[in-house]
């Protein structure tokens, strides 16, 4: 089993003040989650412009969701459908691919890839060579209401945006490399990971049983 920690994120602006993740699917894991039943969207950071989806149930806002899937799964696509200001729908498709298979977990939170993501823990550097120059604030997977040429935030990694006539994003598509990390790097509670989901809150892929 490998533990994947994924953080569906939407950046709020003056043009979009509220959003909800209404559906999340991962076809390769046979996962389908829905708003109110499985997931909830909150703003867990002091920066309230970042809305992040987490598992419904825990009283404290969680940052992202954990999924338990087979170690043989090397690539998967997270399809997040967002409702914006209860007026329109936008879809974010992120294809994640492992750049190695050495360890038993992976996370898209780039802050955890370096040597010391927590306090008092000296983890080895797991940063992929292909994304060595990437800045987390610009490159971490994130959905925006508008593309950068129409007032959206600039991106540091390649994305493909499908726009409507007003420049609003209907669909964003991106690929994102994931290095494997130690499972404890995600599960141990530090100032960085204190709101990460626990192993008990992980969604279990049915493919683990096949």
Image: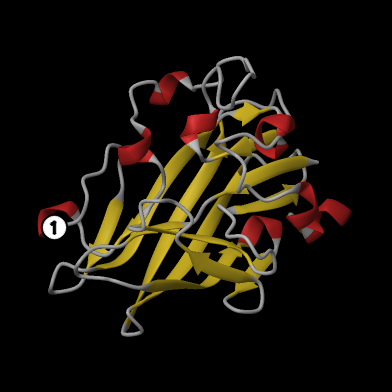
- Quarter residue 16 falls in: bottom left
Quarter of the image that includes the C terminus: bottom right
Of helix, strand and loop, which one carries label 1?
loop
Q: Residue at x 13, y 73 (%)?
A: 166
Q: Residues within 10 Å of mark 1 (few under 14, many from 20)?
A: some
Residue 125: horizontal and vertical position, in percent? Answer: 55, 16
Residue 15: horizontal and vertical position, in percent? Answer: 20, 70
Q: Image height check: is 160 above or below 118? A: below
Q: Residue at x 70, y 63 (%)?
A: 30
Residue 106 seen in render: yes
- Residue tagged by mark 1? 151
Residue furthest to the bottom in view is: 87
Q: Residue 131 vs residue 145: left or right?
A: right
Residue 84: horizontal and vertical position, in percent? Answer: 34, 76
- Quarter residue 193 falls in: top right
Q: Image height check: is 121 above or below 140? A: above
Q: Residue at x 64, y 39 (%)?
A: 74
Quarter of the image that includes the N terminus: top right
Residue 86: horizontal and vertical position, in percent? Answer: 36, 84
Q: Residue 210 vs residue 74: left or right?
A: right
């Amino acid at each position: 089993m490998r533990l994947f920690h994924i953080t569906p994120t939407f950046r709020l602006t003056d043009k979009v003040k509220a959003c909800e993740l209404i559906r999340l699917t991962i076809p390769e894991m046979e996962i389908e989650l829905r708003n109110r039943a499985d997931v909830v969207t909150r703003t867990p950071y002091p920066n309230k412009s970042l809305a992040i989806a987490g598992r419904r149930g825990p009283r404290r806002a969680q940052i992202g969701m954990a999924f338990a899937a087979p170690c043989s799964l090397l690539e998967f696509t997270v399809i997040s459908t967002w409702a914006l200001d209860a007026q329109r729908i936008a879809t974010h498709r992120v294809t994640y691919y492992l750049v190695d298979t050495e360890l038993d977990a992976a996370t898209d939170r780039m802050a955890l890839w370096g040597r010391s993501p927590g306090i008092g823990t000296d983890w080895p550097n797991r940063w992929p060579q292909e994304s060595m120059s990437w800045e987390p604030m610009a490159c971490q997977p994130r959905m925006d209401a508008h593309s950068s040429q129409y007032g959206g935030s600039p991106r540091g990694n390649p994305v493909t945006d499908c726009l409507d006539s007003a420049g609003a994003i209907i669909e964003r598509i991106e690929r994102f490399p994931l290095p494997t990390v130690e499972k404890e790097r995600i599960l141990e509670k530090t100032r960085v990971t204190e709101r990460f989901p626990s192993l008990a809150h992980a969604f279990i892929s049915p493919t683990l049983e096949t």
